[in-house]
Every structure is written in structure tokens, then in C-alpha cells.
Image (cartoon, rainbow, N blue to C red):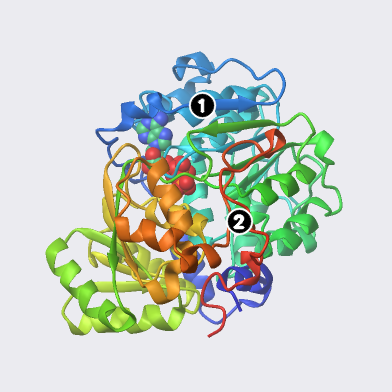
Amino acid sequence: MDEWEEQASGEEEEEEEGSDEVALDSVDVMMDEASIFAHYERGINFDKYDDIMVDVSGSNPPQAIMTFDEAALCESLRKNISKSGYLKPTPVQKHGIPIISASRDLMACAQTGSGKTAAFLLPILQQLMADGVAASSFSEQQEPEAIIVAPTRELINQIYLEARKFAFGTCVRPVVVYGGVSTSHQIRDIFRGCNVLCGTPGRLLDVIGRGKVGLTKLRYLVLDEADRMLDMGFEPDMRRLVGSPGMPTKENRQTLMFSATYPEDIQRMAADFLKTDYLFLAVGVVGGACSDVEQTFIQVTKFSKREQLLDFLKTTGAERTMVFVETKRQADFIATYLCQEKVLTTSIHGDREQREREQALADFRFGKCPVLVATSVAARGLDIPDVQHVVNFDLPNNIDEYVHRIGRTGRCGNTGKAVSFYDPDTDAQLARSLVTVLSKAQQEVPSWLEESAFSSGGAAGFNPSRKGFASTDSRKGGSFQDQDPRSQPAAAAPEEDEWE
Ligand SMILES: Nc1ncnc2c1ncn2[C@@H]1O[C@H](COP(=O)(O)OP(=O)(O)OP(=O)(O)O)[C@@H](O)[C@H]1O
């Protein structure tokens, strides 16, 4: 089974022995203020974000803000923003914050690493604080004002830590729930008060189903990585969530969606969850790659990849590098191979225990292992400082996945590099989408890739319809990717390591 889906449907069962300790390690750790506000620096291209074209569609969008001061945030939020090292808002924040503060539903698209998390957290927290919301005392059912959903455990934990950082020193209490760790521990944490509940879908539905979380006070529903949350793997869970007893109708809640990619069919379906007058915010090309990532391609054959990877890693030394592979088995295999070759490597994938996954991320984050071999479970959202290289050892089978993977580097105005191994025998179906992504990001397109894209092989296998990225708000019509009637929905194809 696809490891994302495994999380979607299998979280409830994951009360394995020892999981309490994991929960204590990861969730309840008492961090000091300095570590809560630890952050990495904006990169040299941070100011260039302001040159990116912004398009807001829908009726009567509010005026964008130019500074955090214009957002009229309360004192504690301003202090926390400044302690986080934020001097000025990024474009998605300049437009997103006033839209959310104006109580509008929003579908927002902005490139990876450009500050989408704060774009939804800040206006929500501001409104809750302005309304005097405070975590209630111990109660065996809590009624959060906001729910944030994301597809992976590590990502939702990261969002929770961001929420906790911005809410530091206030009465608003964020809580996180996700699979692979003790449910009872998380429920106890909810009982202590919960205003902003961050969760992966399976565990969220579990705590709601057990009656530990009531939905009648819910005002905000946020889908981060919204296109992923609404594709085949998670859509049923999202429909169950909005259909849960007590969940306010879409007219009576504010629904916010964020991602760097929005295939058109997903945009159309997303409209089921949003009020009809939702705003669509596009910062740059919808589905476009981060312009601060230099993308290169190396033609390989299946059997030369391992040596090529080793040669590449010899040139990068201790620079932090994420190596993406397609299957869990491949992740173990490549990580073991690299360790045998004395490259300090760890790995993350859906078959590893949650404790091991968190340890792997920590070892990578803090530099103990500069190389992280990962499946798609680490492709979206993770914000790890100083990732200098992303290697696509195996290219993914859809273009959005590629965009998210390479977006683990080149964040917050920093530059990064992505190297992809292109095997003409297996990757030709991606060639045309890659050419489009490269050109839209003003990157050099290798002539052999262009030839491959427009040769019969590249064109015949071209499969944009399900995972094609839209140029704009689908309500305007027209995606810039060709629509090939022969193509099969890519969602039917394996996205990750499901066949193992
Ligand atoms: N206004 C700002 N000033 C300085 N740093 C910022 C600002 N906004 C966000 N950041 C930092 O930029 C980094 C990337 O932000 P974030 O993780 O929200 O990106 P994202 O757009 O959600 O990316 P992805 O699409 O990969 O999920 C984070 O470390 C965040 O703290």
C-alpha cells in the first residue's frame, strides 16, 4: 500500500509498545525559548520574491499589506514574529494575511519555501487572540477553533511547532496529533486545552470519532499541501472530516488551502469544500518550481545510478543532501550502500518506526548524517535548514512530486541545487512536463531532454491530465500543459513505494 494512504487509514492501529516514549520525546518536550525561536537566515534572493507576479482572482479581494505593521497584529504576535527573524512579509503573506483576516475562503499557491505556513497561521492566531480565545482548563472534550491538516507526521509536527512559536506567551494553545505514536498520550494533551488542532487525517478522525474533540466551535479549516489532501489517497478522509458530526458547513467556517501545486482537476474538486466566492491567490506560476533551485539532469542507465550517486556525493562532501528514491526497499538499499562506502547516511520512509523516522530527521537536521535517503514521504513541506542539494536518484512519476522534492532546497531566498538522474527507459513520460517546468523557472533545458520530450516516446508517454499543473485559477479555464486524451489518470499509477 502507498505509504501516504497507510497513514491515512492505518493510524488508529498504531499503538505499538514503547510508543508512549516516542510521544514524550517528540511532542511533550519542554523546549526553551531560544530553541522555539531558532531559525535559519533569509537568503540572498529573499527580496527577489517581491518581483514575482501575483494574481488574485475572485471578487473583491482585499488590499495586500506591504509590512507586518499593516497587518495590525497584536503585540505578542508582533514580538514572536520579530523573534522568529521575520522582518517583512513574503508575497504569499502580503496577500494571504489580509484575505484570511477579511474572513474570505482561500486557495493559495506559492512556490516551495516561500512562507505559506505563516501566511495562514498568523491571521488565524491574530483573530483568535483579538477575540480573547483562551485554552480552557482540563476537559474531556475540547472544541478547537481551528483545525490544520497535512499529509505526513513530520510535516504536521513542523506546522504545530510553528503554531506554538507564534502563539508563544499567549493563551492560545496549539496541539498536534499524528499516527505512529500513542493516541492516549495525545488525547491527554488535547484535554489540557486545545484551540488549534494540527493533525494527520487518520489520527484526527480517530480523536474526533472517539468524541475527544468537538467541532461546534470550529471557525477555520486549513488544508496544507491541499492538492495532496484532496487527491485519491486522502480525499475520502477529507470528506469524512467535513462530514463529521458538528462540523460547521462550508458557509459557516472559513476554509483555507495552501500548496505549491494545484492540478486543475483537484482545483475543481476543492471547490466542493470552499464557499463559492473563494479567492484564488497565485504567486508566480501555479505548480512552478522554486526559481532559486538550479536544476540539472544527468542521463543514466539503471545500473550506473549507484556509482553516479557515490561520485556525486564525493564532490559534495559534508553538504546536506537529500536523495529521493522511489521505494522503501530502495531507500534501505541505497542508505546501506552509502554507509558501507563511508558516507554518513540515514533514511526515512513509511516502513520505519516513527521513532526511527524522527531520529533520522534529527540526525540529518543537526548534521550528524549529512545525507538523507528518502521516499516521497519527505517530499512535501519539510523545512530543514541548509539542505544544499536534492538528488532525484529515481525521478518521480508525476511533475508535482518533482516540484515538491526539489523544493526541499532553495528555501526562504536561499539558493539550492537539484540533480536528477534521468533514465530514458523509465522517465520519458515525464520529459515534457520537465521541459515545461525548467523553462518556466528560466532554467537551461538540456537539448537531449527536449528531444526526448518531443520524440514519439516522450510525447506518447506524456501523462499530464491527472497531475498536470494549471497555469492559473481553474475558474478562468485553460492549463498550459497539453491535454493528451490518451493519458491515464496518474493517480492510478503508484506514487510511491506501494507495491512492495
Ligand atoms: N517573512 C518571512 N521572513 C523570514 N523568514 C520567513 C518568512 N516567512 C517564512 N519564513 C521562513 O521561511 C521558511 C520556509 O517557510 P515555509 O516552510 O512556510 O514555506 P512553504 O511555502 O510552506 O514551503 P513548502 O511549499 O515546501 O511547504 C521557514 O523557515 C520560515 O520560517
The residue to which callout 2 is attached is 228
Crowding at dot 2, Cα within 10 Å, few <14 / some 14-19 / many 20+, comes out as: many
In this rendering, position of residue 37 left or right of residue 111: left
Alpha-carbon span between mark 1 and mark 2: 23 Å
Q: Is residue 391 above or below residue 329?
A: above
- In-front residue for pair 418/323: 418
Q: Earlier in the sequence, mark 1 or mark 2?
A: 1
Crowding at dot 1, Cα within 10 Å, few <14 / some 14-19 / many 20+, comes out as: some
Q: Is residue 182 above or below residue 246?
A: below
In this rendering, position of residue 425 left or right of residue 255: left
Disc 2 CB within 8 Å of nearest ligand 1 atom: no
Disc 1 is placed on an element classified as: strand
Q: Is residue 352 visible?
A: yes
Q: Tell me what residue is drawn at x 50 percent, y 79 percent.
A: 18
Q: Is residue 376 visible?
A: no
The residue to which callout 1 is attached is 54
Q: Position of residue 27 (x, y in %)?
A: 49, 58
